[in-house]
Amino acid sequence: MIIVRDVMQWAASQQLSTPSPIESPDDFCRFLMSRGTLADNPNVVVLYWFLLKRRQDVADAYPSAIHNSDDNGFRAWLINSGSNEESISDLLCYENEEDIVDYVADAFNRLRIAKRDDVFEEFDNLWSDERVFDEFSAWFSLYGIEDMGFQAEHTKRIRNARGGPFRILNIYFLRGDLQIAFPSLWEDSQIKGFSNS
């Protein structure tokens, strides 16, 4: 499948880790059919983006699909002939925009993919300073939804995530490998490395 190859070459060029198609084929298929991975087009399914890049005739026929994979005409084309033309029929069942397992992880992953270093710098101490966390929550509930297309559920889960670091620290103290990798977790440089691992 040429489109899958294109996706994987793009992911490698972006240094984006993807599930292994051999070790985790279902997760890999979910990645191909996921949204929120393309920074400038959070409402576009990854595989469809590359399909539209490769098939200019389809992109010309359904220009809205470039920014929104729910375009009705594009969906009709996929169902009627497109999925067979592109040999992606087996992948369609892996798409479910509502199927976000961890909204907090999804939010931070999408912020990293979008290269929103400004957000990470502005709210640098959000997990260690309650005031900064509250400011981040307020920013996220307004600009996260407006600028990046996050759902209200993302905002709700972010607000409820304040206790999460304490549960994460329990994992840290139960795992020797993490303690060896981050022996001075109270230092800013180590806590940042730990939170990004």
Image: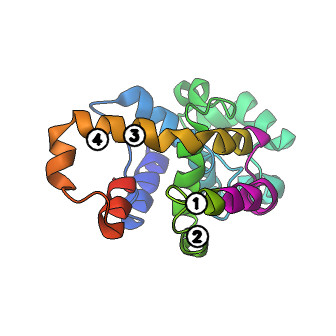
At x 55%, y 35%, the residue is 102
**Is 135 a magenta residue?**
yes
Q: Dividing the image into 4 quarters, which one contains the N terminus? A: top left
Q: Is residue 35 visible?
A: yes
In the image, what residue type sits under mark 3? Ile
Disc 4/disc 2 C-alpha distance (Å): 27 Å
Of the two numbered discs 1 and 4 on the same chain, state the one appearing first in sequence. 1
From the top left corner, tell me how far across and down residue 65 is, in percent.
77, 51
Q: Nearer the viewer, residue 137 or 25?
A: 137
Q: Are marks 4 and 2 in contact (CB under 8 Å)?
A: no
Disc 2/disc 3 C-alpha distance (Å): 24 Å
At x 76%, y 43%, the residue is 151
Q: Are marks 4 and 3 in contact (CB under 8 Å)?
A: yes
Helix, strand, or loop for circle 2?
loop
In the rendered image, which residue does mark 3 sit on?
168
Local packing at callout 4 (Cα closer than 10 Å; few below 14, some 14-19, many 20+) is: some
At x 29%, y 63%, the residue is 190
All told, the count of numbered labels is 4
Q: Nearer the viewer, mark 1 or mark 4?
A: 4
Q: In the displayed structure, would residue 90 be above or below residue 178?
A: above
Q: Are marks 2 and 3 in contact (CB under 8 Å)?
A: no
Disc 4/disc 3 C-alpha distance (Å): 6 Å
Of the two numbered discs 1 and 3 on the same chain, state the one appearing first in sequence. 1
Disc 1/disc 3 C-alpha distance (Å): 20 Å
Tell me which segment is drawn in magenta.
134-153
Q: Which mark is residue 172?
A: 4
In the rendered image, which residue does mark 2 sit on?
116
In the image, what residue type sits under mark 2? Arg
In the rendered image, which residue does mark 1 sit on?
111
**Is 146 a magenta residue?**
yes
Of the two numbered discs 2 and 1 on the same chain, state the one appearing first in sequence. 1
